Image: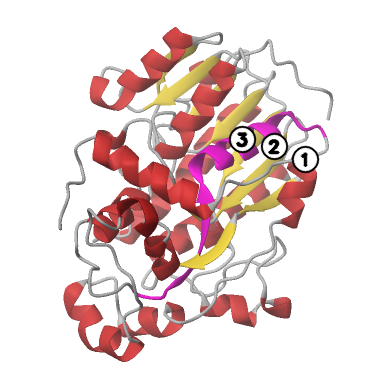
Amino acid sequence: MKELNKNNPVCVTGANGYVASWIVKKLVEQGINVHAAVRNPSNMNKVGHLIEIGKLGPGSVTLFKSDLLEQGSYENAMKGCEVVFHTASPFTLDVTDPQKQLVDPAVKGTENVLHSASKTPTVKRIVLTSSCAAIYTDAVDCAKAPRGVLTEDVWNTTASLTYQPYSYSKTMAEKKAWELVELQNQWDLVVMNPSFVMGPSLNPKYSTSESTNVLKMLGNGEMKMGAPKMGVGVIDVRDLADAHIAGAFTKEAKGRHIISAHNTNYVEMGRSLLPKYGQSFALPKKALPKWLLLLVGPMVNSLFTRKFIKNNVNIEWKADHSKAKKELGISFRSLQETMEDGFQNLIDAGMLANKK
């Protein structure tokens, strides 16, 4: 691929999202003009922070109305762009119709965006926000991976419409993207596969990220008796934004990239908040026994099925991030910094109050 010109605008789909907002901010700070594709450009609760980012410069933000399921609705936003960051995809775990709420928007939306890119002659590279969920479903899958570690060569084979449909939607969407790459030779595809994204939101009151839900559960006393020792990977949202931008403008970048800083679990995540917030908030200090979770988990939270608990609690999560570090040249914040900044972000927004 030829060197990309940072004087050209770039398109960001789902630009008001948790991760995308940071990508927009960091692009603008580098003097890049962003075409921000959002569902409703007139909803100031959702896009006001993007307008403010644009005012700070030196780059700019221009809003475009686009919808994942509306064919061709991204073409205006892509005009003149060499790079498209496709971040738009639903992230919710609590769904009643997974096909309609998760799979269709993720897969058809990816198809829609990539087809629009093929109709836009200036587009040379697409950076796709996939997920480690396209690599694994449960922590137990790590143990089954070669050498017990997730790598970019591994694909999720255990999620389905009826079990972990979010993971299934991310897997199907990324597979669709790789299918579409083969049908053209105009643009190349660089994929980011982040683990659980944590850290501060640029629009906390209107963020729908699951990280906000986890921080609330840790801080509002729900887990004061203990947290499930559930194996997860964690990446700071700001480091993930840096990875996307490196993926766009590093000429040699190609393929999938696991973007995950820490192999951790919910207990360690809670403990990382204790030094700063332990006196004021009822944070978890220990792990809940697995037998107790198996007994009460399904009653407390419908997502905590016995199968889910068996496959994730007291099981170590391991992934290899060496490709991303080497190819993209990124470094990672500490788990404590990520957790503290995310927690403080919710306190400042009035979404977490002292519970002790």
* Colouring: secondary structure
State if disc 1 and disc 2 touch (CB < 8 Å): yes
- Bounds of the magenta segment: 228-251
Using the image, determine if residue 89 lies above or below residue 46: below
Measured in 3D between alpha carbons, the distance from the residue under mark 2 to the one under mark 1, in whole angstroms, is: 6 Å
Residue 204: horizontal and vertical position, in percent?
30, 36
Measured in 3D between alpha carbons, the distance from the residue under mark 1 to the one under mark 3, in whole angstroms, is: 14 Å
Is residue 231 covered in magenta?
yes
Using the image, determine if residue 318 lies above or below residue 309: above
- Residue 206 horizontal side relative to residue 33, left or right: left
Measured in 3D between alpha carbons, the distance from the residue under mark 2 to the one under mark 3, in whole angstroms, is: 8 Å
- Seen from the viewer's position, the closer of residues 214 and 156 is 214
Residue 166: horizontal and vertical position, in percent?
41, 60
- Seen from the viewer's position, the closer of residues 278 and 326 is 278
Q: Name the residue type under label 1.
A: Ala
Residue 266: horizontal and vertical position, in percent?
40, 67
Disc on the earlier residue, 1 or 3: 3
- The residue depicted at 38 percent of the width and 78 percent of the height is 308
Disc on the earlier residue, 2 or 1: 2
Residue at disc 2, secondary structure: helix
Residue at disc 3, secondary structure: helix
> On the image, numbered disc 2 is attached to which residue?
247
- Seen from the viewer's position, the closer of residues 304 and 215 is 215
> On the image, numbered disc 3 is attached to which residue?
242
Q: Residues within 10 Å of mark 1 (few under 14, many from 20)?
A: many
- The residue depicted at 33 percent of the width and 38 percent of the height is 345
Residue 329 in sight in this render: yes
> On the image, numbered disc 1 is attached to which residue?
253
